[in-house]
Image: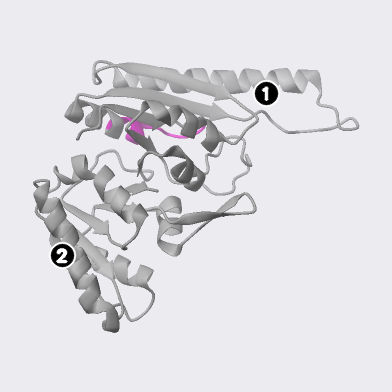
Amino acid sequence: MAYRTLMVHLELDGNNSGLLEIAAGLANEFSAGVIGVAACQPSQTLFDEGLIAGSVLVDDYTEIARGIEAAEAEFRMALKDRAKSVEWRSSITYGPLASYIAEEARAADLIVTRPDRGASTLGDTRRVKVGDLALQAGRPLLIVPHGISSLTLNNAFVAWKDSREARRAVADALPLLRRAKNVTVLEAASNAAQSRAHDRVVDVAHWLEGHGIAAEPVTTSPSGSDTAGLYDEMIERGCDFLVAGAYGHSRVGEFVFGGVTRDLLLAPDYCVLISH
């Protein structure tokens, strides 16, 4: 298994250089093609008894078009001669941006994107809700924090939870885990559940061994929450890449996430691969 086509999501008003550098490195590593994608919603500003002023609408579309054009130019410059092929896709849409990107993800093996920026002065017109994207895309997401421009794989961790999402994530991450120097399968469990947790992580480590990956099975018994226990153990062991399942469900049209997933979507400290 390898990633043959990557999709990299560019922000229209952000610094995409680190994101693109990682996408270029992966494209070179896997001899992969790269699809650049960007999306934006028109302004919803209303006035004059609920009517949108024509001039404001035209100016807004013009500004968005310029932003998309600039993002495409940045994408093509960064990937020039560094990918098997390059392609650009973009949209000005009134629908959720995550839904547009999720639809386009049918053409890719892996989506490279930024963490969710949360609420901003721009509202949702330029914000992709990364959690929604993870649950809708049917593809793994590689989340690249701001300020990171290289994918470090010295100490890779699999945050294990015996669930469909975690099984999907570790399978999707195989191409990257094969390139990691050290791999740890880690599960947080209470003292009473340590024996069963140990058996589970040993099973996963053996499964990884069958795919040519040496992995250390580890369990931890945190004094506080499982989330805090996982983080403490990963910090102590110098984690620089994490694989995790994206756990969430829809509640009245909004996706609600567990603690680990929520933290990884908003402010990861290192690159994270998540799958649902």
Badge count:
2
Name the spot of residue 35 as percent of width and height, x first: 37, 23
Residue 204 numbered tag: none
Label 2 sits on what residue type?
Val
Q: Position of residue 232 (x, y in %)?
A: 29, 69
In which quadrant of the rendered view does residue 26 lie? top left
First of labels 1, 2 by sequence position: 1
The residue labelled by disc 2 is: 202
Residue 271, visible in the rendered structure: no
- Identity of the residue drawn at 41% across and 29% down: 106
Q: Residue at x 32, y 24 (%)?
A: 34
- For residue 15, say whether it is visible: yes
Q: Position of residue 83 (x, y in %)?
A: 25, 20
Q: Secondary structure at mark 1?
A: helix
* Magenta span: 13-21
> Is residue 267 a member of the stretch shown in magenta?
no
Instruction: Give the class, few, some or many, for how many residues have Cα within 10 Å of label 1's Cα (few <14, many ≥20).
Output: some
Q: Nearer the viewer, mark 1 or mark 2?
A: 2
Q: Residues within 10 Å of mark 2 (few under 14, many from 20)?
A: some
Q: Quadrant of the N terminus?
A: top left
Residue bearing the label numbered 1: 60
Q: Is residue 226 above or below residue 171?
A: below
Above or below: residue 115 compared with residue 202:
above
Give how far apart the Cα atoms at labels 1 and 2 are: 55 Å
**Location of residue 60 by image quarter:** top right
